[in-house]
Image: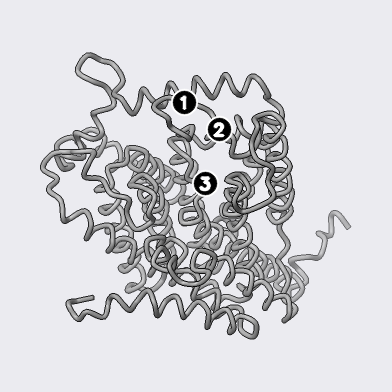
Amino acid sequence: MLGTGIGVYIPVVAYLGFWVMCIVSFSKPLYGFYYLIPFIPYRTMRDHFLPYPLGAQILTILVLCIITGAILHGKRLPASRLYLIWLFFGVYLYFSMWLGTVLSDAPAPLWLSDFNFANWKDYMLIPLIFAAAGMVIEDRKAIRTVVLLTAFSVAFIDRSSLLDSMTRSWANFDESKRSGGPLGFGANQTSAYLTQFAMFFWGFVQYSKRYKIKLAGYALAGVTIFTAMYTFSRAGYLAILFGVLVLGLLKDRKLLLILVGFLMVWQSVVPTAVRERVTMTETSNGQLEASAQERVDLWENAKRSFYHSPLLGTGFATFQMSEHVDNLKDTHNWYVKVLVETGIAGFIFALLLLQQMLAISYRLFKRASDPLYKGLGLGLFLAICCLIVTNFFGDRWTYIEITAPIWILVSAAIRAWNFTLAESTSASEDDPSLSAPAPYYA
């Protein structure tokens, strides 16, 4: 760290800090939650915990301690359909694994040594983080702090990604130069995280009244877009363009003109390596290049699997058990994966989650009077739109590092919406003219 040699001690201190915050969370669960936020996306930092006792489970342990502390202090979840949808979806996915045991010879989901049960456990950590956030975020100050900590997290991911990217020469694109990034799963996953939060902060500062905050938000969004550009993810590029389109339609129509102008001249303004990456979808003969053709072949395999069991699917986490093109274990499209593994029933649950996320954020954006809440609603709506786009090109949904930070902001939006409703009710009670019936109707 800055040449001082103390960087090697940071993982040890961070690991010990988790255990300290586990204890603190029983009395101050909000403090434990604050400590948790920056570590959720930073998978490569958490990988340093693996040699230590329970290092692989320390994130789960802290989340459970936060929830336990919140329950002990009488904290409750805010009113929202999302909690029930997640509960039913989680139960459905568990029984779906047993269906996979019957249909696909998958192991019985009983132990962490069973790959399907381990996948389910890791996936269910996302709604647990969502529930923990819902319990401890109880006032405007907590909402503001969560947004601020999210900004710090994004800044650290930007820094790590940029330092990694700048060590390479990008005069020309080369697939071998792409790294796993700070999320630890590959450049495409890192890009999905960056694009959704670039658009979140771009939207969030639209209603900020303070010049310094607005400037800092725009700077963070700009740096994050620049960082995402050098992940060379075509899905990320498309998500940013779609996010700008939505922002232009909802808030700033000038962006629509800028977007059209950019699409007309983009090949002359982006770096050569980026242009090469975007235009390599087809070969010089007009055929799909290898990675694009692989996805088409995978989707054809997935379609055949779906037709065998369209209602309930083949079982959660079973697609990876079959032989596919080039030994790939994923459908490279989350929606296709949900349909194949959990059927139409599971797909309905997934659509309900997305619909509720969009509805909460849009209502908050349109009806809140507090600039903090209004910006939170708009930014979150844009981030979810980006998340929807990137999931067409791979599974970005089940990664805690990508999706859990979004669910934390959804929890903040739910609280903000409840505060907005309470303020509206209070205003109506204070001013009888707002609630009294008109004389004509009386």
Q: Looking at the image, which residue sits at the far top? A: 285
Q: Quadrant of residue 361?
A: bottom right
**Who's the residue at 39% across and 49% down the image?**
185
Residue pointed to by mark 1: 324
The x and y percentages for residue 346 are 67, 37
Q: Secondary structure at mark 2?
A: helix
For the residues labelled 2 and 1, say whether their Cβ atoms are less than 8 Å apart: yes
Q: Secondary structure at mark 1?
A: loop
Residue type, mark 1 in image: His
Specify few, some or many for label 2: CA neighbours under 10 Å numbering under 14, 14-19, or 20 or more.
Answer: many
Which labelled disc corresponds to residue 119? none
Of the two numbered discs 3 and 2 in the rendering, the one whose residue sits closer to the viewer:
2
**Who's the residue at 39% across and 67% down the image?**
48
**Viewport quadrant of the N terminus:** bottom left
First along the sequence among labels 3 and 2: 2
Specify few, some or many for label 1: CA neighbours under 10 Å numbering under 14, 14-19, or 20 or more.
Answer: some
Residue pointed to by mark 3: 397
Indicate left or right for 407 with 342 as reference: left
Which labelled disc corresponds to residue 319? 2
First along the sequence among labels 3 and 1: 1
Q: Looking at the image, which residue sits at the far right? A: 442
Residue type, mark 2 in image: Phe
**Who's the residue at 54% across and 78% down the image?**
141
**Viewport quadrant of the C terminus:** bottom right
The x and y percentages for residue 108 are 69, 42
Residue closer to the observer: 81 or 360: 81
How many labels sit on residues? 3
